[in-house]
Image: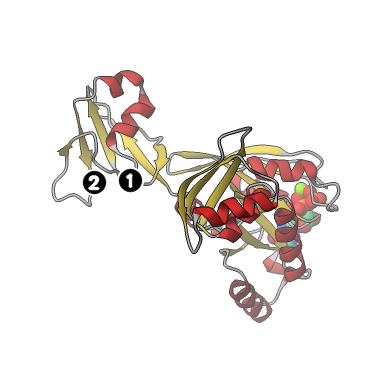
Amino acid sequence: MQLVILGFPGSGKTSLFRCLTGKEEPPGASRKPAPGILAWNGVYFQVVDTPPILSESSSGKLMALARNADALILTIDSTMDVYLQLDSLLKLLDDNRITVEKPKAIVEIEKRATGGVTIIGDLINATTQDVISLLREYNIYHAIVRIQGKATLDDIEDAIFGSYAYKPAVVMLTKVDLLDGNTLKSMAEKLMESTSLPVHLFTSTQCSSLRVEEIASYIFKELDLIKVYTRNPKTGEVEKRPIVIKRGAKVIDVARKIHSDLYKNFKYARIWSPRLVFSPQKVGRDFQLEDGDIIEIVA
Ligand SMILES: Nc1nc2c(ncn2[C@@H]2O[C@H](COP(=O)(O)OP(=O)(O)OP(=O)(O)O)[C@@H](O)[C@H]2O)c(=O)[nH]1
Ligand SMILES: [Mg+2]
C-alpha cells in the first residue's frame, strides 16, 4: 500500500511525513520523493514525501507518482487560501485523469482491429446500440468495453479520452497551531462542507494527535479492502501482518494468495471472529471473509 503526500511549497508535507513515519528528512525545501514506512494494524503503508507542486507544466513526475499510489494525502496550508489550494490540487489531478471521488463505474475501452463492439458489464439509461453509435462518432468501430459497476453513456464518452484512475484522498489542513481557535473552527467546518473528502487537522508540534486509524481505515473502506489474519495450525500463532484482500473475498481466495498448494489441496478452514456465534467455526471454500477475521487453512 502506498500513500503519496501532495501539496504546494511549504504546505507542511515533510513535517507530516516525519510524523507519519518517524523518519527524519533534511530541513528545507524537498527536492526528491522520499519513502518511509507507516505501520497500522500490521499493514505496512509506504508513505512518500514529495517535492512541492510548482506549476502545472512541471508536475508530470508528481502526477505519475500520484497515479501509481494507492491513495493520496493532500496538504493544505491553513495560513494561506485553503480553497484555492484544494481546488488547484483537484484540478491538476483531474487534468491528469486522476479522480478522488469514488466513481460509480469504471469503464475501460480496448480498441480492436476487428470484431465489432462488445460490452462486458452493465449500462444505465443506455442500450448497446447507443454505445455503438457513440463510439462511431469517435471513429471507433471495434472495441471491447469493460464496465465495473453501472455506466451511463457519459461515463463511456469520458472513457474514450482515457480512463480515470481513482485514488482515495484525505485533506490535511496543516499548521493549525498558527490560527486562533475560532478561526480554525469555522475554517474547518466550511472546508468540510465544501468537499466530500475527509478533512484532518495537523500541527507538527502535536504529532500524536494525528488520527492515523481514521485515515487508514478510510482508505481501506474506499478501496474495498479488508484485513485477514492467518493462524498457524501447528503453533496456534496468529500472524501479526494481515493478508490484505478485496471485500467479498472467500476462504479459497486467501488460500490461493498464500500458496498454490493450499489452494490445490484445500480441505476446510477454521475462522475466529466475534461476529460468529461460536469460534472457531469450520467452513468451506466459499465462506465469505470479513475484516479482522482470523483464518486457519487445513489442506
Ligand atoms: N507553526 C507550524 N509550522 C509548521 C508546521 N508544519 C510545518 N511548519 C513549518 O512550515 C515550513 C514548511 O514545512 P515543511 O514540512 O518543510 O513543508 P513542505 O511542504 O515539505 O515544504 P517543501 O518541501 O518546500 O514543499 C517549515 O518551516 C516548518 O517548520 C506546523 O504544524 N506548525
Ligand atoms: Mg518538503
Distance, label 1 to label 2, CA atoms, is: 7 Å
Residue 78: which quarter of the image? Answer: bottom right
Question: Looking at the image, is 81 positioned above or below residue 36?
Answer: below
What residue appears at the point 53 percent right and 54 percent down from the top-left corner? 129
What residue appears at the point 75 percent right and 56 percent down from the top-left corner? 92
| Between 28 and 48, the one nearer to me in the picture | 48
Judged left or right of residue 43, residue 252 is left
What residue appears at the point 57 percent right and 44 percent down from the top-left corner? 108
Give the labeled residue for mark 1.
292
Residue 140 visible to an observer of this rendering: yes
Residue 38: which quarter of the image? Answer: top right
Q: Residues within 10 Å of mark 1 (few under 14, many from 20)?
A: some
If the image is split into quadrants, where does the N terminus sit?
A: top right
Q: Residue 84: give x, y in percent of width and height.
A: 77, 68
What residue appears at the point 63 percent right and 43 percent down from the top-left corner? 141
Give the labeled residue for mark 2.
273
Looking at the image, is mark 1 or mark 2 earlier in the sequence?
2
Q: Residue 170: give x, y in percent of width and height.
A: 59, 58
